Every structure is written in C-alpha cells, then in structure tokens.
Image (spheres, grey):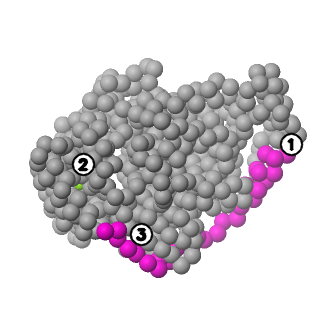
Amino acid sequence: MLHTKTSHIEEIIGEAIEKARHYTEPQLISVVDQIDYIDAYQFMDHGQVVDYHRLFWRSAEEDFTMVGVGTASKLFATSERRFKEVQSLWNEIREHAVIYNRYGEKGTGVVAIGGFSFDSKQKNASPWEAFPDSQMTIPAYLLTNKSGKSFLTTNVMIFPEDHQQQIVNQIADHHEKLLSLTDHDFQLPERTNTSEVAPELWKASVKEATDDIKKGLLEKVVLARELRISFSEPVQIAGVLKALAESQDNSYIFGFESEGDYFVGATPERLAKVDKRELISTCLAGTVPRGGTEEEDQHLGRDLLHDPKNRQEHQFVVEMIKEAVEACATNVDIPEEPVLYPLKNLQHLYTPVRATLDEGYTILDVIEKLHPTPALGGLPQQSSVEYIRHHETLNRGWYAGPIGWFDDHNNGEFAVAIRSALIQNDSASLFAGCGVVEDSDPQAEYEETAVKLKPMLSVLGGY
Ligand SMILES: C=C(O[C@@H]1C=C(C(=O)O)C=C[C@H]1O)C(=O)O
Ligand SMILES: [Mg+2]
C-alpha cells in the first residue's frame, strides 16, 4: 500500500548516518509519501501497535486532521522562557533536518504537535505528572488527512552510532504494522460515577473574586472547577475523539496520549493560526446556552449580544489581543462589534482578528505574546494568573493551555485546551471555567460552567 521507494530510503539513511558521524550530531530525516486514504480515527486506534505516544488534531474549520504515532524527537522546556526555548530546540533540529517532501502540503514533513501547560510556575503535580510544562513532539509517523487525501510522513532521528540496515528494517516493520489496519466500530465508555469537586466552595470563590474586583485588585479573572467521573472499563481514546468530532461542530478536536494518560477535548477557541504570513486570532468570551426552540435560541443570542456583563468579559479579551497582535503584525483588522458563535450546547460572543505577521516572528512568538488571554486568565494578565495560582484549588495542568502544531513552512495553529478532560485509565477529570467580572453572579457562573462541561460529558457516558 505504501509507495515509498524503499531503496531510496535506504540511501537517505546511509547518507544521514555519514553526516551524523561527520558532524557528531544527530540528523533528522523526514520522508513524505502520499498513501491510499486512511480513516484518522482508525489510524489513531491502531497506532498502538507501534507506540503508546499518540497525538490527534483536527481543525475546526477545514478537512484537515493529523495523527502522530511515536516520537522522532520531543521538544521539552520548563522555564518561564519555555516558548523561546522550544523555538530554539526546533531551529536546531531543522538546521540538521533532511526533508524529502514532494507534496509540500501543510502539516506534512517535520511537524511538531503538542502543547503547553496553562501556567509554567505551577508544578506538574497530580494529576498532571504525564504532561510536562511544554511537550511538542515530532512524531515518528504522522498521518495527515487533507481534503480527502492521506499523506504519511516518516521522521527518524539518525545518530552517529546507528546501523543503516537496522533502521531500514525497523521502518519497514513499522510501516507494515501501521498500514495493516482493518476498520472496526468503537465502544464509548460507560460511566459508573460522577462527582463535582466542591461546588459550594467554588461559588464562594467566585463571590470573593467579585469582591476583589470591586476593591480594584483586578478587572477580570477566569475561575475553573473540576468534575470527576469513573467508568466501568478503561477508556478507548479513538472512539471518544470520533464522537466528539461528530457532535461538536466548529471545534478543534484534540487528543494527546502521554505515559498512558489522555488529554482530550473539543475546543472552539483558536489562539492563533499562521498560514504563510497571514495571522488569525480569535476573541471568544461571553456565554449563554442554546435555546430549546429556534425562537428561544434567537432570544438568548440577542440578549447575549446586548448584555453589559458579557460584553465587558468579551471586550477585555478584544483589547488585550489587539495590543498583542499589533506588537508583531501589521494590517490588523478587528470588527467593532462581536457576533454570535454557535456551538451545540452554547453560544459565545466572537470577534475574529486578522493581520499580517511581521517578518522575523513565528507562531511561538505570537503564542508567547497572547497566552493567557483574558478569556482564560484575566486582566491584568500577570495579577490574574497569580490570583488563579493562589485561589483556584485545582491544578490546571494543560487545561486552558495552548495546544496545537507547527510545521517547517511557517504554518501552524494553536487553540486553547478548554472543553477538555484528563482521562486516566478508568477515571477522568473534566474542567470548565468562566470569566468573572464585577457583576458576576456565582450561581449563574456555576450554571455556565455546567453547560461547558456538557460536550465532554456527553461522549463520556452521557449528560
Ligand atoms: C474557560 C472556559 O471558557 C472561556 C470562558 C468563556 C466565558 O466565561 O464566557 C467563554 C469562552 C472561553 O473563553 C472554559 O470553557 O473552561
Ligand atoms: Mg462567561
């Protein structure tokens, strides 16, 4: 099925070993093949025959899905300069990379997929041990499905001491295993228990935050809460991803497997997308549920558009993103008024941001400037993140952090990891937060977070 010119790959590996010996530096090689169409969920499920580090990403707006299996290289960074550190690790790998990519499709070849925790100063304590501060993986095998076509990238890090035939055999063996998949149905998990973590305490913390905002300590802060659930059996990730994709339009579907744990979700919120030099960001904040009837739905939407409390929540985000984007881009285009962004269970206020990224900046520079926006942190940025660190009882880990990908052609996209769950064997933690401003009502915010938990709950055993 795979049309890799195997003799060619042998040659490529041989040359890379020589180069690695000559420079005494590892060399990344990347070979891209177009293959017969493969279903991304089946590939995700089947990928475990080769490795238990699997990565899934599906765009919210186009037919574009990536599934990574295994690791050619991992970009880790732990300091507060983590975005810059990941960038320099990436630059170093790229400098030595030999890429055979006849197609040049975005998201093929040398691609890094993964994410960053919300707050680099928060320890990766329980339950997030498997998800370090920053983890961008260049997968060993990457399926890229775009507009009905499938591409398979093979990435391998070649070391001076490697043996040519051994690497050739290993790749051939993995290709055979990965591509010998047969489609089958997925089982969704059966939920046995659901428990909200300290809801009354959380409401009290919202009340306290409104008091602190009135005192002038800060203007907005996003506070999150947790729901714990358990299942009759360990969860199978591919079925959950497929069910999310089928039930949640206008959302990025993501799933990261790390050391046996899964972080999955369906987030509507893009942080930044860079395509050539076009930069797109999104202001998404302010929420009401969908209505039961068309009339009720429109009524709720109209109210949201004119509600001062929600408009304030939203406006803080617009102003901050505008400032951050203007610092690295020109032709910044932001509509004056938000519009509605409808999802299955809720509707948000939405303002798109378009700009031309200045020369010399990468998507990681943009992420560094934006994260966290007041949609996930608050305003001012610094004090709201500190406020969250001290007042929120849960450990956010990767929840609300930037997740996404970038490739070798300056393409890439990151979203924020909300509407998500950390799945560990037969249990899971779900997270949802909301923007607290001066006029927030704790009970209303509690109900808002309950609706935000629905997309994940619905695929993890029903509402
Ligand atoms: C923090 C979350 O969502 C954010 C908060 C919103 C709000 O409070 O109105 C809306 C969209 C998101 O920016 C979440 O879903 O967990
Ligand atoms: Mg809100």
- Residue behind mark 2: 221
Amino acid type assigned to the residue bearing label 1 in the image: Gln
Would residue 202 be visible to someone looking at this image? yes
Q: Is residue 90 left or right of residue 218?
A: right
Closer mark to the observer between disc 2 and disc 1: 2
Mark 2 and mark 1: Cα distance apart in space:
54 Å
Left/right placement of residue 198 relative to residue 161 reads: left
Residue found at x 53% / y 64%: 424
Which residue lies under the disc numbered 1?
Answer: 166
The residue that mark 3 highlights is: 228
> On the rendered structure, is 335 left or right of 423?
left
Label 2 packing within 10 angstroms: few (<14), some (14-19), many (20+): many
Question: From the Cβ of disc 1, is ligand 1 less than 8 Å away?
Answer: no
- Note whether 155 is above or below 393 in the view shown: above
Please state the extent of the stretch shown in magenta in the rendering. 169-198
Q: Quadrant of ligand 2?
A: bottom left
Tell whether 144 sits left or right of 62: right
Q: Residue furthest right?
A: 165
Q: Secondary structure at mark 2?
A: strand
Comparing labels 1 and 3, the label whose residue is closer to the camera = 3
Q: Is residue 273 above or below residue 223?
A: above
Q: Amino acid at mark 2?
A: Val
| x and y, in percent, of residue 234 in the image | 57, 71
Image quadrant occupied by the C terminus: bottom left
Tell me the CA gap for discs 1 and 3.
Answer: 46 Å
Q: Are marks 1 and 3 in contact (CB under 8 Å)?
A: no
Reply above or below: 179 against 18.
below
Counting residues from the start of the chain, the first of labels 3 and 2 encountered is 2
* Picture coordinates of residue 412, whole percent (x, y): 49, 37
Q: Secondary structure at mark 3?
A: strand
Where is residue 273 drawn, in percent x and y? 42, 37
Q: Which residue sits at x=68%, y=28%?
A: 97
